[in-house]
């Protein structure tokens, strides 16, 4: 039986960043949203054989492990608010960077008053 899995094109699988928590959320979210398609792609690699079949089989076993699935859902739930906060802080810092001269003028004006 051939089953076609729909790939969520709004997300992409990404490398795990060592320093950016929002990157970790994005990676976990991509795996979660595309879980069935990722498993099918790995199974296809195993079926095709070749040099990548062993790695694909091992990765497929890990992805199907209940501990991985539970950890993925927990991390997704925990890192989601961190991603939101990170995006909001980026917006604030971008605002400050773009309006740096205004803040310097205000700061200098405040200093000159004392």
Image (cartoon, rainbow, N blue to C red):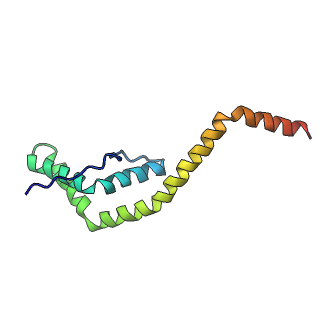
Please indicate, yes or no, whether residue 39 appears anywhere in the rendered image: yes
Percent across and percent down for residue 97 are: 64, 36
* Residue at 23%, 56% in the rendered image: 36
**27 lies left or right of 52:** right
Point out residue 106 in the picture as x, y percentages from the top left corner: 80, 37
Give the position of the C terminus as an image quadrant: top right
* Residue reaching furthest to the top: 101
Relative to residue 48, is residue 29 drawn left or right? right
- State the image quarter where residue 105 is shown: top right
State how many labels appear: 0
Q: At 62% across and 45% down in the image, what residue appears?
A: 92
For the view shown, which residue lies furthest in the right direction? 114
Q: Position of residue 21 (x, y in %)?
A: 47, 51
Q: Relative to residue 99, is residue 84 depicted above or below?
A: below
Quarter containing the N terminus: bottom left
- In the picture provided, is 93 more to the left or to the right than 68? right
Q: Is residue 59 visible?
A: no
Rendered residue at 26%/49% (across/down): 7
Which of the 4 image quadrants contains residue 3? bottom left
Q: Residue at x 82, y 35 (%)?
A: 108
Q: Identify whether 42 is placed above or below 111.
A: below
Residue 73's place in the image compared with 6, above or below, is below
């Amino acid at each position: 039986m051939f089953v076609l899995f729909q790939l969520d094109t709004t997300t992409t699988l990404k490398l795990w960043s060592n320093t950016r928590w929002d990157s970790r959320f994005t990676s976990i979210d991509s795996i979660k949203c595309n879980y069935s398609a990722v498993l099918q792609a790995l199974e296809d690699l195993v079926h095709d054989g070749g040099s990548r079949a062993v790695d694909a089989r091992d990765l497929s076993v890990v992805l199907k492990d209940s501990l991985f699935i539970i950890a993925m859902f927990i991390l997704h739930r925990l890192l989601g608010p961190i991603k939101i906060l990170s995006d909001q802080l980026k917006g604030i810092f971008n605002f400050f960077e773009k309006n740096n001269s205004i803040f310097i003028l205000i700061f200098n004006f405040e200093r000159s008053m004392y």
